Image: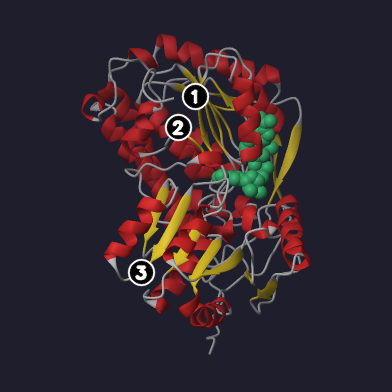
């Protein structure tokens, strides 16, 4: 049975959204010459007008970052840098509710997730890296080498604040200055972060935020004054960036797409596994690069798992992202919704069986019901391509070797999950899987101390942990 819940909306009065935003360059707000709207994907309401960064804006930001690197940031001791990072982390905690509501309004994710995952983890990344800033010689990285200098950082729309934290915190801890571009559809929390930098008294030019679209990102990638590029986003754009950077001296880290396999062995604890499957694919509307988007079930338990999974999916609450009861929010943009629709239509056309949860979808905004496809074969597009939505492709296997064969049969290699009661099974499978992150009897768990990254077309380098620090120092890693 489904309980009726009274709506429990979070108040949006805690956030103040300006009608127009400029770029944050050299510690000041600089209005752009062109603008675009950012909307709430749950209602299509226009939230604000955002500056579209030109090559001249990027140039000004790179010059500011270079000046700050030469004159102030590179001269500070690790201890002093750490103080600023601690201050930023504490202010993020103090303003956590504001960040959470703003993220939910601009991105469409449920307030429960922005409040309990995105914002606390973002602050945790700053705390973690603040701690390393004066202890780099103990981090196992080559501290005889220097920071790169000016780092260009380009991030996607699925975890706007968290991806900013993943990028900015290690760069600053190791002594770099940054020019960051948030995604076109989700600039607002990056702009609030700029206010936090001002509040923390961070020296001008250490963090510069230039908003815009792909052309702004491209201007950052191709700017000769940039020493390193750190990118998170699609494999397609990652390849373009790798080509652009190849003939230069720039360093590069890429965190790209995935098609994570979530493998369920016959001896798994089924009820816990079903919760893990739901968390693996429906967390953040499935807009997760490491989502468990391919469920690989042992035949002996496939019927039972699918029956329980469908029953559980019918209880997922889809709707107003600001309602604290909501499990699944809005799809981030009309473009992303169109992409999900195109791939799910291909799944049906290619012969997979489609089943969607029985839920009413709001009429305004961008929505997609939690969906699974059964009878999926490895040749189907929905088994090979990243859907980046609340859609799960289900395959089955008889022997463990077949499970591994199917799990690894992808151009990606970002994440995987294993569900089994036997430690030996888990250890064996982890050694066979070609994935950067492997969870056992859980899924989508993140920690700043744990390195994250992929094999094959899922990217180059690691973010987070000690491995992530070395990517921001010359000579070590990429
Ligand atoms: P993109 O890779 O296009 O965007 C990621 C970032 O790169 C954004 O800030 C984007 O700007 C910027 N960008 C776009 N083109 C260029 C370029 N030529 N040079 C430099 N920067 C550029 O991802 P999308 O947002 O378009 O999503 C498309 C697909 O990518 C999704 O459906 C999903 O499959 C995958 N994806 C994977 C993510 C991951 O974490 N691995 C995250 C997001 C998406 P802007 O958005 O403003 O145009």
Return the x and y of residue 117 as percentages of the image width and height.
43, 55
Badge 2: few (under 14), some or many (20 or more) residues near its Cα, within 10 Å?
many
Task: Classify 30 as above or below 67.
Answer: below
At a point 50% along the width and 48% down the height, the residue shown is 99
At a point 49% along the width and 83% down the height, the residue shown is 304
* Disc 1 versus disc 3: nearer the observer: 3
- Dot 2 falls on a residue whose secondary structure is helix
Please state the total of marks drawn on the protein image.
Answer: 3
Task: Classify 172 as above or below 60.
Answer: below
Label annotation for residue 168: 2
Q: Marks 2/1: CA distance?
A: 7 Å
Task: Classify 418 as above or below 22.
Answer: below
Instruction: From the viewer's side, name the closer residue of 90 and 347.
Output: 347
Q: Marks 1/3: CA distance?
A: 43 Å
Does ligand 1 reach within 8 Å of label 3's beta carbon?
no
In this figure, which residue is indicated by the disc labeled 1?
Answer: 178
474 left or right of 368?
left
**Which quarter of the picture shows residue 465?**
top left
Quarter the C terminus occupies: top left
Q: Is residue 411 visible?
A: yes
Badge 1: few (under 14), some or many (20 or more) residues near its Cα, within 10 Å?
many
In this figure, which residue is indicated by the disc labeled 3?
Answer: 420
**Which quarter of the picture shows residue 443?**
bottom left
At a point 33% along the width and 61% down the height, the residue shown is 426
Marks 1,3: beta carbons within 8 A = no
Instruction: From the viewer's side, name the closer residue of 159 and 430.
Output: 430
Marks 2,1: beta carbons within 8 A = yes
> Which residue is the extreme one toward the left?
138
Return the x and y of residue 230 as percentages of the image width and height.
51, 30
Marks 3,2: beta carbons within 8 A = no
């Amino acid at each position: 049975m489904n309980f009726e819940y009274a709506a429990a909306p979070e108040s949006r009065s805690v956030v103040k959204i300006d009608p127009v935003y400029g770029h944050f360059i050299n510690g000041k707000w600089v209005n752009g010459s062109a603008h675009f709207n950012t909307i709430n994907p749950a209602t299509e309401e226009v939230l604000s007008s955002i500056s579209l960064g030109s090559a001249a804006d990027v140039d000004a930001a790179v010059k500011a970052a270079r000046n700050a690197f030469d004159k102030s940031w590179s001269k500070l001791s690790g201890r002093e840098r750490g103080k600023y990072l601690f201050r930023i982390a504490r202010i993020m905690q103090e303003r956590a509710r504001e960040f959470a509501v703003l993220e939910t309004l601009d991105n469409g994710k449920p307030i429960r997730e922005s409040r309990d995952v995105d914002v606390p983890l973002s602050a945790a990344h700053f705390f973690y890296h603040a701690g390393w800033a004066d202890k780099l010689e103990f981090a196992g990285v080559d501290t005889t080498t220097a920071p790169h200098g000016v780092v260009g950082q380009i991030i996607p729309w699925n975890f706007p604040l968290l991806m900013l934290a993943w990028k900015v915190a290690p760069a600053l801890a190791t002594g770099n200055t940054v020019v960051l571009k948030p995604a076109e559809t989700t600039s607002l929390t990056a702009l609030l972060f700029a206010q936090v930098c001002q509040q923390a008294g961070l020296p001008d030019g250490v963090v510069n935020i230039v908003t815009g679209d792909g052309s702004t990102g491209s201007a950052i990638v191709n700017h000769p004054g940039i020493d390193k590029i750190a990118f998170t986003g699609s494999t397609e754009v990652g390849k373009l960036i790798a080509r652009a950077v190849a003939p230069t001296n720039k360093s590069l880290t890429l965190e790209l797409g995935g098609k994570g396999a979530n493998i369920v062995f016959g001896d798994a604890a089924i009820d816990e596994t079903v919760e893990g499957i739901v968390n693996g694919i429906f967390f953040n509307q499935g807009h997760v690069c490491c989502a468990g988007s391919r469920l690989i079930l042992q035949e002996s338990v496939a019927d039972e798992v699918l029956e329980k999974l469908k029953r559980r999916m019918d209880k997922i609450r889809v709707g107003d992202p600001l309602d604290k009861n909501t499990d699944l929010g809005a799809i981030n943009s009309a473009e992303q919704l169109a992409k999900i629709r195109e791939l799910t239509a291909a799944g049906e056309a290619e012969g997979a069986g489609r089943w969607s949860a029985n839920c009413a979808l709001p009429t305004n905004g961008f929505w997609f019901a939690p969906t699974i496809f059964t009878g999926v074969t490895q040749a189907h597009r929905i088994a090979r391509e990243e859907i980046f939505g609340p859609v799960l492709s289900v395959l089955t296997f008889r022997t463990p070797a077949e499970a591994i064969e199917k799990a690894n049969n992808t151009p990606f290699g970002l994440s995987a999950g294993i569900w089994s009661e036997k430690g030996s099974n888990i250890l064996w499978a982890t050694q066979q899987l070609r994935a950067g992150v492997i969870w056992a009897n859980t899924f989508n768990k993140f920690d700043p101390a744990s390195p994250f990254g992929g094999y094959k077309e899922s990217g180059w380098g690691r973010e987070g942990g000690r491995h992530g620090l070395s990517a921001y120092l010359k000579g070590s890693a990429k």
